[in-house]
Amino acid sequence: MTNTSADWPSYLKPTTDAPADDMALDGVLQAFVVGVTNIPGSLVRPRWQPTPLPEPEVNTDWCAIGVTDEQPNENVAIVHDLSGRDFATRHERITAIATFYGPSARANAKRLRNALYVQQNRDMLRVPGLAVFDTSGPIGTAELINMAWRRRADLTLRFNRSDTQSYTVENILSAPMVVTTEDGATRSFVSPQGS
């Protein structure tokens, strides 16, 4: 199959890659936290893991981060270009929560929040298509883990993103046409490309 509209009736698959999602998006967020805080990469973990790693010691600063919600815009813009492609674009808002643990939990959450508003840092997020919308908090709390209270701070991050997918939808290059005038006369012709 060629995956074009010429294969009708059949399904069309996108011809472009989707933006980072799932584990790839978790990796983008993890790299950002590592880049703007002084927390080592091994201590900035995906929020949900198939096999959770052991909890770091009580006096260790670490972070768990992950996407909790995606809200797509209700409208999808479809643009057909002359090269035979349809571009379907949808805007979405992505919400992630970064949970910081350790003696500097709130300070690290604030460091991440403030770093999101520095242009060079924002530019690093634009590469995977994220634009900072806003942040909350941080909300300070504590969590009882293994009979020990741990300092904890939750920071909600919201991003805007545009998701554009390309589909090969062929143009009509020419078509036979019949024009009937008011007096009943008909004229047949083939419309040329580009008319």
Image (cartoon, helix red, strand yellow):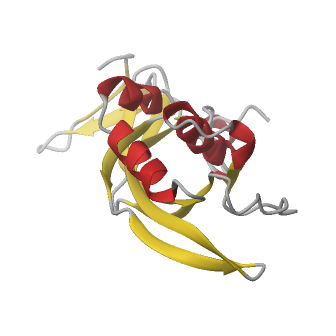
The x, y position of residue 73, in whole percent, is 35, 59
Q: Residue at x 83, y 63 (%)?
A: 52
In this view, which residue lies farthest toward the top?
193
Q: Residue at x 49, y 26 (%)?
A: 84
Does any portion of residue 19 appear in the rendered image?
no
Give the vertical position of 141 relative to 87 (above or below).
below
Question: Residue 167 sits in which quadrant?
Answer: top right
Pick whichever, 186 or 172, lies toward us.
Answer: 172
User: Is residue 57 left or right of 104 when viewed as pictured?
Assistant: right
Where is the N terminus found, in terms of image quarters?
top right
> How many marks can you see?
0
Give the vertical position of 47 relative to 44 (above or below).
below
Give the vertical position of 84 relative to 111 (above or below).
above
The x, y position of residue 107, in whole percent, is 43, 51
The x, y position of residue 132, in whole percent, is 34, 43
Question: Residue 78 sits in which quadrant?
Answer: top left
In this view, which residue lies farthest toward the right?
51
The x, y position of residue 66, in whole percent, is 59, 57
Q: Residue at x 38, y 50 (%)?
A: 110
User: Is residue 134 left or right of 22 when viewed as pictured?
Assistant: left
Pick whichever, 88 or 53, lies toward us.
Answer: 53
Pick whichever, 67 or 129, lies toward us.
Answer: 67
Does any portion of residue 37 appear in the rendered image?
yes
Q: Residue at x 29, y 20 (%)?
A: 195
